[in-house]
Image (cartoon, rainbow, N blue to C red):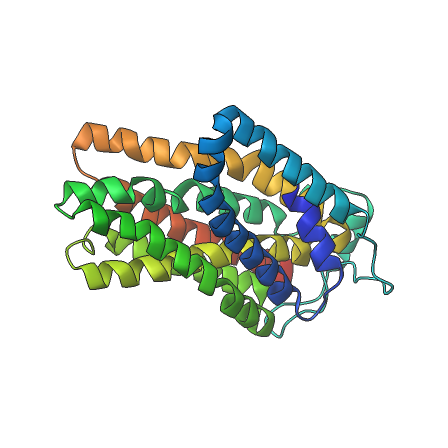
Amino acid sequence: LTFPPAFGVVGAWFDRRRALATTVATTGAALGSVVFGTCLRPLAEALGVRGTFVAIGCIYFVVVGSAAFFVHRPGHASNAQGGKCSPSEKCPTQASVEAIKHGSVWAIPGFICFVVACTLLAFAFWVPVVHGVQFLQDVGRSSTEADGLTRALGIGGLVGRIPLGIIADRFGRTLTLSAVTACMGVLLLTFYYSGQDPVILNLWAVLYGGFAGGSQGLIPVVAAQLAGIERMAIAFGMCWGCFASPAIALGPALAGWIFDLTGTYELSFTASGCVLLLSSFMMLAAWWRARS
């Protein structure tokens, strides 16, 4: 519930560097998850599981509630269509402006393609995160090496977001997200064959984690580019909350079901990679619809 308004608050203050600002914010969120995660076990041992959840809720209430008192709109008026356009992106069409004015995000050119792209992305990109450790153990990797996949994914997610934000502001937010999703698809297509060499596996995990983390920071920026900063929260909430979030649970579950039928993860990873490539194509279609 806090993600859409949080991204809206950050994005409202930035125009030319909105992608960089948002990826910096998501990097802080990822770092906070890593740091705070180390506190969970000591808290659980001291307070019990129920007491730990109560403590987390209280901390969250105090921190977010206090921060809300300091939030205010910037002094300058934001552009209707999510800020300045990069050379690869045109400024808002009249249809976009009218759609925003009348509150219909579905009428915005490219928004439906964007929703489909994000749903496909959410469906597939968690599959190696959920099933990767078990897959590596099945192919003979030690528990230490298999657990290292999660660490490498986390490292990539931390270091990859800000560079992708810089690239997105320079070459276009929607095109960058499309390219990032395509790279994730190609990497996922090769994952089944990358588990034999630890060096290649760690390199794969850092790259995939960087692209996956970067994509999460770029999605709200593209939503602002399409729907405008005034409607970014509702556009992102509609896209990620109503459609993409259920797909996050469905994708890994379906991949596990395919593994139960076939006894191997090859088809699950290959299909997920193809879904990511399709997501990249739909993101490109959203860019084309918004541009034309």
Position of the C terminus by quadrant: bottom right
Q: Dividing the picture into quarters, in which one does residue 92 lie?
A: bottom right
Q: Depth check: give the residue in front, 261 or 58.
A: 58
Q: Residue at x 52, y 24 (%)?
A: 50
Tell me if 166 is positioned left or right of 146 in this view.
right
Tell me if residue 233 comes above or below residue 154 in the rendering.
above
Q: Position of residue 142 (x, y in %)?
A: 16, 47
- The residue lying furthest to the right in this view is 75
Tell me if residue 45 comes above or below residue 271 in the rendering.
above
Q: Depth check: give the residue in front, 239 or 46.
A: 46
Tell me if 99 is positioned left or right of 200 in this view.
right
Tell me if 192 is positioned left or right of 27 in this view.
left
- The residue lying furthest to the front in this view is 46
Q: Dividing the picture into quarters, in which one does residue 78 lie?
A: bottom right
Q: Residue at x 35, y 31 (%)?
A: 253
Q: Position of residue 12 (x, y in %)?
A: 75, 58
Q: Residue at x 55, y 66 (%)?
A: 165
Q: Is residue 105 visible?
A: no
Position of the N terminus by quadrant: top right
Q: Position of residue 163 (x, y in %)?
A: 50, 70
- The residue lying furthest to the top in this view is 50
Q: Dividing the picture into quarters, in which one does residue 200 lie?
A: bottom left
Q: Depth check: give the residue in front, 120 or 125.
A: 125
* Total numbered labels: 0
Q: Residue at x 15, y 55 (%)?
A: 196
Q: Is residue 142 visible?
A: yes
Q: Position of residue 5 (x, y in %)?
A: 71, 46
